[in-house]
Structures are given as structure tokens and as C-alpha cells.
Image (cartoon, rainbow, N blue to C red):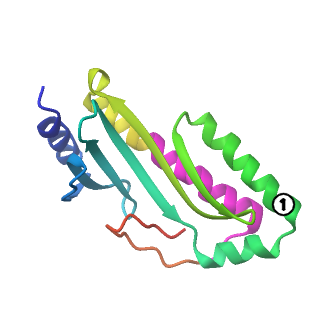
Amino acid sequence: MNIEKDVEKWLSEEDLLREMKYDENADFHYIIEFPNDNIMDVVKPKDKDCVVIACATQVAPQHQNLMISSDKNTQREFIMELNFGLNQFLVDYELKVSNDILQQFVITEQIFEDGLTKNELIRTVKRIFKSKLHCIWLIDQKFGNVAVNAAPSNENDMFI
């Protein structure tokens, strides 16, 4: 099994592959788009026997302002609900929170070489995206929806 060739082939077959990125810390680093306008990374870290799928999201200033204008109890409840919800997706995640205001979230999952198949890769990509949707929907539910101009970016920033 040639992991790099297999992963590249699978991503191409599903029309997800957008770019190959140079990364000195990785054997390979692909930028994918799933679904349209949502950018994710698929990376094989050097000296590791896994592939990491990641999606980083910057919270739009408009949403942060809605959070700031809410009461402290609502802010804290939101962060707690977000943690509980993300745990149910069985993904790894990191929340960047300042003064109870969510600034950014990064959702990741790793697939070890002995479990890497096309099916597992695509299912993991979908699970990460659904985890991101959970975050977006929870923000809208708790704080309201605002129109934000979102465009795909290979800088791995998405604005919700």
C-alpha cells in the first residue's frame, strides 16, 4: 500500500482534491474541498503512521459581537454545549476561547495506516464537516444568524 498515492487517488475520484501543499513536517499535505466552499486539510505527518484530516474555522466578527452582547451565563452555557456536542461526534477538537467568546475552532481526526481505506477516509471527512455544521448551527441557535460573505480559502480559514 502506497498511502500517498492511494489517498490522492481516492480524493481525486471523489473530486475533493484541490491542491497539493508543500509542508516540511509532512510526507504529504492535500487541500480538499468538501462540500463546496468548505476547505479541509488531509495530512500525513512525517514519522507518523496516520493520516490527519482537519478543518479550521475562524468565527466571524459579526458572530463574535453577538456573543459579546449576550450575558455571561449564555456565553458559558454555549461553550459547554459546544464541548458536549463535539464530543458526541467522536472527533478531536480545539476551541480558542477568550473571555468566554469563541474565536476559532479546529476539528481533527486521525486514521491509522492499518485502518485506512477509501470508505474510512470519506466517512471521516463527512464526520468532520458535520461536526463543523454542529458548531455553526449552535452559534446561530444561541446568538442569532447574520449574513457573512464566505469564500473558500486555502489559508485554512473559513468564516461562518
Q: Residue 16, position in %: x, y?
A: 26, 52
Residue at screen point 64% across, 57% down? 137
Q: Quadrant of the C terminus?
A: bottom right
Q: Is residue 140 magenta?
A: yes
| Type of secondary structure dominating the magenta stretch | helix
Q: For the magenta stretch, what is the residue range?
A: 127-146
Q: Residue 112, position in %: x, y?
A: 32, 27
Q: Is residue 101 in view from this perspective?
A: yes
Q: Residue 19, position in %: x, y?
A: 20, 60
Q: Where does label 1 land, which residue?
A: 74
Q: Is residue 15 in view from this perspective?
A: no
Q: Quadrant of the N terminus?
A: top left
Q: Is residue 130 magenta?
A: yes
Figure disc tally = 1
Vertical side of 26 occupied by 157: above or below: below
Q: Residue 59, position in %: x, y?
A: 58, 68
The amino acid at mark 1 is: Thr
Residue at screen point 23% across, 41% down? 46
97 sits to left or right of 29: right
Q: In which image quadrant can residue 110 be found?
A: top left
Residue at screen point 70% across, 40% down? 84
Nearer the observer, 128 or 97: 97
Q: Which structural element holds mark 1? A: helix
52 sits to left or right of 47: right
Vertical side of 79 occupied by 104: above or below: below
Task: Judge the density around disc 1: few (<14), some (14-19), many (≥20) Cα neighbours within 10 Å.
Answer: some
